[in-house]
Image (spheres, rainbow, N blue to C red):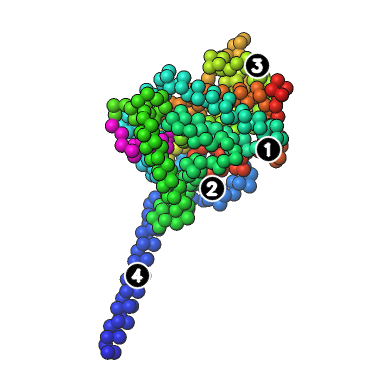
Amino acid sequence: MDDALELSWGARCAGLAFFSLSIFSVALGAVLLLVRRWPNPWCGCHVCRAYLTGSWAKDFTNLADWYAHLLRESPTGTVQVHVLGCTVTANPANVEYMLKTRFDNFPKGKRFAALLGDLLGGGIFNVDGDAWRHQRKMASLQLGSVTVRSYAYKIVAQEVEARLLPVLADAADMGKVVDLQDVFRRFAFDTVCKISFGLDPGCLDLDMPMSDLANAFDTASRLCAMRGAAASPLVWKMKRMVNVGSERELKKAIKLVDDLASAMILQRRTLGFDNTHDLLSRFMASDVAMDDKYLRDIVVSFLLAGRDTVASALTTLFIHLHKNPEVTAAIRTEAGGDRPSTYEHLMSLQYTHAVLFENMRLFPPVQFDSKFCAAADVLPDGTYVEGESRVMYHPYAMGRMPSIWGADYEAFRPDRWLTGPGGSFAPANLYKYPVFQAGLRVCLGKELAITEMKVVGVAVVKAFEVEVVGENGRSGWAPTFVPGLTASISGGLPVRIKRTTQNS
């Protein structure tokens, strides 16, 4: 009996020792993996120290503003954040080198794909090589179609007249403050669902909650962006492995996105797609075999490209118009008062076009874009980039570089885009202004996005005065952006709407 008890005690000791050894092995493995995957965790340079401690926030509203400051101070327009294993640049020559000259050496890469893979899957924004070329070719055929562009314009114009303007008119008549960012996000979600999927979620009813898909997509976008901000991928990967914290929340959000995207695809199949013009139907009607997973990734990619970017640009546009009433007056004059805004008329508005581009220079919807340096390389400014490291070009910072835009880079000045006696719009070199990317990955939906912004901007400016209220309305106020794949203002944009004299 005593021998049995002694053996049992010995077994327990052995089990405890084995358990302790297992825990130690896992911890040691984690530390070794951290050392291997975290390029320089003990770097003490001022940039890395400020990033890790968050001390940059003492002087800058946003992380993007801190990066812009560092890049302006750099003689080459490039800095390295060693703890992230990341090179950050605002040098146009480097951007051209990455996006054109050495395109194949700067793919999205496996690490970037891992960050967004749960949300974007194998969609066009998250793949390289043949998969990317195939999707881009198909998307180019659809988005370049005159039929699709005409269809998209009609939907946007209808949504503006039937839904957006009545919502703003109601706010004006009731004298209530509304969150313009929320209004534009709802509007853009409705339009992208109609254009892309032929379905109407009906979000632009402010008395109704935002759709489950829109909310889940927002959550997933925010949490995926948080992954990219982590000093080491080991942090979020371990949280995902044990399903805790932000990774557990992300998993739930993506499950909802998957379920609702599948429902969209099923509904589209049920309604039929042979004689419809929405983008999903055109993909489904093509000769290329596509399973539901592939279609799901297309749905999510369209949502990312068509909703968040447009809503972000429209929101910041009205920040600038509030601060620059003379620009608002010039848009009204160019638009021609009661003159109907046909497609041809809108496309002829050169000054308004310049206003949109000037707004996105200072507030690009996508503030930075990351690539992966496959093999060690040297950028045109002489910066050495290690193989298998991250390289980021920064449109937000590039819009604030005196070396690109001159000493008045901080000024909102639409006429910097105009040339000649008639004031014709003159686009900037895409590698100096990569708001829509550049090179082989230049945005295929650029013209659709600009058209939507112009339709909305002109219609709202002609009908209403938009006053930013509260702290946000102060002359020196600058927006605080929340983490996300696209720029979104923390706390929204509260505004008061008033009818213009001609719309009273």
Please give the range of residues in magenta: 289-302
Magenta part mainly helix, strand or loop? helix
Give the distance between the C-alpha atoms of the residues marked 1 and 3, in whole angstroms. 27 Å
Residue at the front extreme of this rendering? 271
Name the residue that disc number 1 marks: 177
**Considering only order in the chain, which callout, 3 or 1, is on the residue closer to the N terminus?**
1
- Distance from disc 2 to disc 4, alpha carbons, whole Å, reads 37 Å
Residue at left offset 42%, top offset 19%: 147
- Give the mark toward the camera: 2 or 1: 1
Above or below for 420 versus 45: above
What residue sits right under mark 2 in the picture?
51
Amino acid residing under circle 2: Tyr
Residue 280 is marked as none
Q: Position of residue 352 (x, y in %)?
A: 60, 20
Asked whether 296 or 4 is in front, the reply is: 296
Q: What secondary structure is found at the residue carrying circle 4?
A: helix
Residue that carries the numbered disc 3 in the rendered image: 338
Q: Is residue 290 magenta?
A: yes
Q: Tell me the quarter of the picture where residue 472 sits.
A: top right
Q: Position of residue 207 (x, y in %)?
A: 60, 40
Q: CA distance from mark 2 to mark 1?
A: 37 Å
To which residue does mark 4 refer?
Answer: 19
Q: CA distance from mark 2 to mark 3?
A: 52 Å
Q: CA distance from mark 4 to mark 3?
A: 79 Å
**In this rendering, which labeled residue sits more in front, label 4 or label 3?**
3
- Which tag, 4 or 3, sits closer to the chain's start? 4
Viewed as shown, does residue 451 lie left or right of 233? Answer: right
Q: Is residue 469 visible?
A: yes
Q: Residues within 10 Å of mark 3 (few under 14, many from 20)?
A: few
